[in-house]
Image: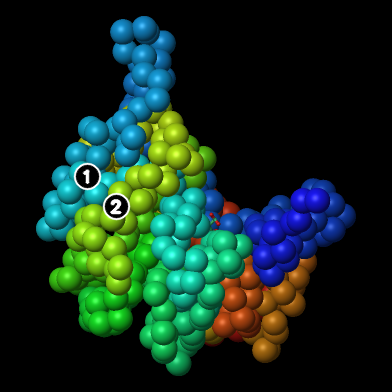
Amino acid sequence: MAKINSRYQKVSQGYFSTEIAKRAKPFLDSHPGAEIYRLGIGNTTEAIVPSVIEGLRKGVEKLAKTETYTGYGDEQGDSRLREAISKWYAKRAVSVEPSAVFVSDGAKSDCANIPSIFSDDAVVAVSDPGYPVHREAAVISGKKVVSMECLEKNNFMPTMPERADLLYICSPNNPTGTVATRKQLESFVAYARKNKAIIIFDAAYSEYVSDQALPRSIYEIEGAKSCAIEIQSLSKAAGFTGVRLGWTIVPKELQTEDGAEGMLNRFWSRRQTTMFNGASNIAQEGGLAVLSPKGQRETHEQVAYYMENARIIREGLSAAKMTIHGGVDAPYIWLQCPRGLSSWEFFDELLTKAHVIATPGIVFGKGGEGYMRISAFGHREDVEKAVHSIRKNFGTIA
Ligand code: MLT
């Protein structure tokens, strides 16, 4: 008789976006005409920029003619795109060989699947609070998970684990909006090298960093190629949350206790060719357009638009004497719930009084209790109205 994977019972019943939708439903159903400001899930809302739309169209057009039609693509992703990714890193003084690049359908699946190339007994360290995919995928796959506290007393930086084989580090951080400094990343690289551990660096929000002193790639840190895998996404950088495209860098130099050089790169290739047939060729054509000079200019302008939203939220709520963190070089604002309310209690109040949907910090782990994550990915008008409404209902206007 078939048996279930009981590890699914160790994670919450629904993914956090499902839980939020369920919790909001009774209010939304009973207030059909209410204007609701959705700053919960980190979902982009602005149209894809013109040069990238052109790229996507080109991808569609190619499929319309036998001479340019393509079916299955290159195993690790379109070789032109992998070259372009390597050059994109080179412009940032980071050297990444195209053979280390694996094009994907976005960061989420790679974050969830990458532990499968490591041994079953690998201990996985995840931030608490942290992006739920890191913890939940590791739990579902049966790996032992340990938490790295990410609390205010440590400036929301993960505390070094006593023992871990894999460490998920996300910077700029989802959910706290904290950005790791060079020094902080150097200490993680030193830890990984000393313990022969591997860092899984989730760089999905790197394009939100404008402070030149802050690293946007783990490979800006000396020695990182021997101990870090980097996962990137165009979801937030180019509005590809629905298009789906990203990449993962698995350097051949990675060191493990028992594997020869290049083995993890080979295993990831084996995993992907067996269980994934590559990103859509249309999306990859769009990806090439994102990395073109015009695409970079236009997408960075869009990032600046969302960062202006972040400024409006940050300054608006601080001026109303609310306690907030993040939102600088990161599109998430980490708001402390007033009056000692729990995250879900404040979620209900925010929704019913201010008509704002935000994400309760507790969905990111117990260290997130007492906080709310506010996303800067809304339309400007909604963001302004949401800030006004939160201030009116919960702030002390000085
Ligand atoms: C979020 O944190 O809201 C994410 O970007 C959505 C997701 O889980 O993929």
Kindly indicate the quadrant of the structure image that contains residue 7. bottom right
Would residue 163 be found to the left or right of residue 320 on screen? left
Are the residues tagged 2 and 1 within 8 Å (C-beta)? yes
Q: CA distance from mark 2 to mark 1?
A: 9 Å
Percent from the top left, x then y, of residue 272?
A: 41, 43
Q: How many marks?
A: 2
Name the element at disc 2.
helix
Label 1 secondary element: helix
Q: Is residue 235 above or below residue 153?
A: above
Q: Determine if residue 12 is in view.
A: no
- Quadrant containing the C terminus is bottom right
Looking at the rendered structure, the kind of residue marked 2 is Asn
The residue drawn where x is 40% and y is 15% is 63
Q: Is residue 130 above or below residue 321?
A: above
Instruction: Give the residue at mark 1.
Output: 99
Depth order, front residue of 332/310 = 332
Tag of residue 291: none
Residue labelled with disc 2: 265
Front disc: 2 or 1: 2
Q: Position of residue 186 (x, y in %)?
A: 23, 78
Position of residue 370 relative to residue 24, above or below, is below
Question: Residue visible at 38% across and 44% down?
Answer: 270
Badge 1 local density, few (<14 within 10 Å), some, or many (20+)? some
Whichever of labels 2 and 1 marks the residue nearer the N terminus, that label is: 1
Give the residue drawn at x 37%, y 23%: 59
Whether residue 62 is visible here, answered yes or no, is yes
Residue 105 % position (x, y)? 44, 42
Taking 88 as reference, is 312 left or right? right
Please provide percent x and percent y for residue 250.
29, 55
Q: Nearer the viewer, residue 55 or 96?
A: 96
